[in-house]
Image (tube, helix red, strand yellow):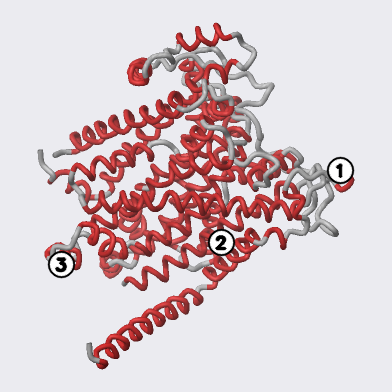
Amino acid sequence: MGMRSFILQRLIQSVVVLLGLSLLIFVLVRVAPGDPVRAALGPRVPQDVVDRMRAEMMLDEPYHIQYIHWITRTLQGDFGNSLMTRRPVAEDIKQFLPATMELALFAGVFMAAFGILLGAASAYRRNSWLDNAIRVLAYTGVVTPAFVFAVLFLLLFGYYWHVFPTAGRLAQDMVAPPTITGMVTVDSLLTGNWRAFVDGLKHLVLPAVALSMAGLSQQARITRASLVDNLQKDFVLAHRTYGLSDRSIMLKYALKPSLIPTVSILGLDFAALLSNAFLVELIFNWPGLSRYGVNAILQKDVNAVAAVVMVLGVTFVTVNILVDIVVAWLDPRIRMRIANQGG
Amino acid sequence: MSSSETAAAHDARALWWAMKRDNWRRMWYRFTRNPLSVVGLVIVLVTGLAAIFADYIAPYPEHAGAFVDFGNAMKPPGGQYLLGTDPVGRDVLSRIIYGYRFSFGMAIVVIALAAPPGVILGLVAGYYRGTRIDSIIMRITDIFLAVPPLVLAMAITAVLTANVFNAMIAVTLMWWPWYTRLVYGLASSLRNEFYVQAAEVMGASKFHILFREILPNCISSILTKMTLDMGFVIIIGSSLSFVGLGAQPPTPDLGTMVADGAKYMPDQWWLTTFPALAIVTVVLGFNLLGDGLRDVLTVEEQ
């Protein structure tokens, strides 16, 4: 079995998982007690309007018919209408998803880069003041909820130290670049709008850092532990006896195998990141999918909730497939196992 | 039965207990060698006891509910109110202590409900690795793991009504798969150990093999995870209430206090800072304690 069929197998597995997830969401939003239409329209709307809406959403059909209908439409990208905005949910998602993706990508890259960098520096200068400082920082990051970081940043940067803006994606007097990908920084770069790019980047800093702290700390701790472990292995000693410098041993031989555990949990850290986006987007007034999701949840907008959870599920599953491929590339043992499994 | 036999049995039992006691003493000694673990234990004990005896410890127990005293509203820390008062004149320290009671209660209930089914499913799936039972259990686990945890918890809480009870249900529903995953990994490697194979050859029941042979060897990992999870459930719980999906006012909750206090920054900084510090402190305590336990228990196993 080669790499290609390994990926194919992971894809099939993911489809099964996503179908299961869709069933779970369906049970959650449709079978739960209470009438979602009545809840959304409020008590003063006449009964015949509620009945018409129920019929429109097929809420009167048996559950299995409802599910089949719902999943077919979902697969076609039709999530129904939002009970709150009365617009198609798909439109809302199209509008809000890019902002969340921009934030999540930025935070994810920041998390992986700095987590690995700090962990490697910590292991390289083991037991120095730098190592101790990084370990304290990493511990703080793990035990502090994302919303505490966000509120702390809001206090520091909103009132005392006006280096980075604390709300929205662009300054109010800034003209937004034309929508191409929906990500402000990418769009402004594509249109050569340098000022908007810098401003968009500045707006990204605080929410992205608040979002990535937990994962970054986790990554730093795991990278340090695994690098310290590997630096004591025989193959490192062998390279040292050949007279290779510490630096080249680190960069060429020790770091790569040490990254396997780090990358393996990257997928989980990304999930934590998407989770925390729900809190961070709310605090920094970031017009993304998570803020939309929180409002949908608070207002019991079932179609929107289902769509948001489904979109995040697909995102997370995709990231995990990518992570598996990277791990297979990093770890020769896994590559061998894939190659040897046959048929 | 002769008297010498019972005496021998008695001696054996005494010896067994003496060894057990020795083990505990040695583990405790090693645990106390690491000052950070001891700090963690002290934090957990102090906050835990404060939560249990809140009625006696809190300076103003009546401030835990819907109490109003506008004459003493927004008092800065110090003097009569050690950590200041909130916009309606309630003592922040008292509310933090009662907030701990809620946080601890939620964490204990969630872990007590999530761990047993998670562990049992993990044991079964790990022992029957490669069979259909394994793939069914682990695929279901994957489904629950396919959504970012807080998102699923929020969605569940929202569909039900937002209150403490439903928040606990929601967090429990997304927490058990982590135990399944942990125990699955352990059980699938432990089943190849000689003592498990010996039990199989002797015709021991599956129940005996799963719960008397494999489970005891997973306990230290499970205990460590439960300790660390206490902290993480407290984070998730306070995150839910921060958004307004957990404890409803006037129940004192640390997450709600941070959210409400944020409106009064930076002038009434104590309204957010102290509840936030309270969360960080208790989570830190459980993390230090969990790491300490892991060090002691894994060395013991080797």
Disc number lying in front (1 or 2): 1
Q: Position of residue B70 (x, y in %)?
A: 86, 43
Q: Residues within 10 Å of mark 1 (few under 14, many from 20)?
A: few
Query: Label 1: which residue?
Result: B70
Mark 3–mark 2 distance (CA, rounded to whole Å): 41 Å
Residue A117 appears in the rendering:
no
Q: Is residue A98 above or below residue B300?
A: above
Q: Which quadrant of the structure image shows residue B57?
A: bottom right
Mark 1–mark 2 distance (CA, rounded to whole Å): 35 Å
Query: Hey, what amino acid is under mark 2?
Result: Gly
Q: Which mark is residue B124?
A: none
Query: Label 3: which residue?
Result: B198
Relative depth, front residue between A126 and B22: B22
Q: Report the chain holding disc 2.
A: B
Name the side, left or right, on which B259 lies relative to A193: right
**Element on which disc 2 rests:** helix
Identify the mark nearer the N-term, 3 or 2: 3
Q: Residue furthest bottom?
A: B4
Query: Label 2: which residue?
Result: B285
Query: Hey, what amino acid is under mark 3?
Result: Ala
Q: Residue furthest left?
A: A343
Q: Position of residue A116 (x, y in %)?
A: 43, 51
Q: Residues within 10 Å of mark 2 (few under 14, many from 20)?
A: many
Q: Position of residue B11 (x, y in %)?
A: 31, 88
Residue B136 appears in the rendering:
yes
Q: Report the chain holding disc 3.
A: B
Q: Position of residue B10 (x, y in %)?
A: 32, 86
Give the residue displayed 56% in from the left and 52% down from the top.
B105
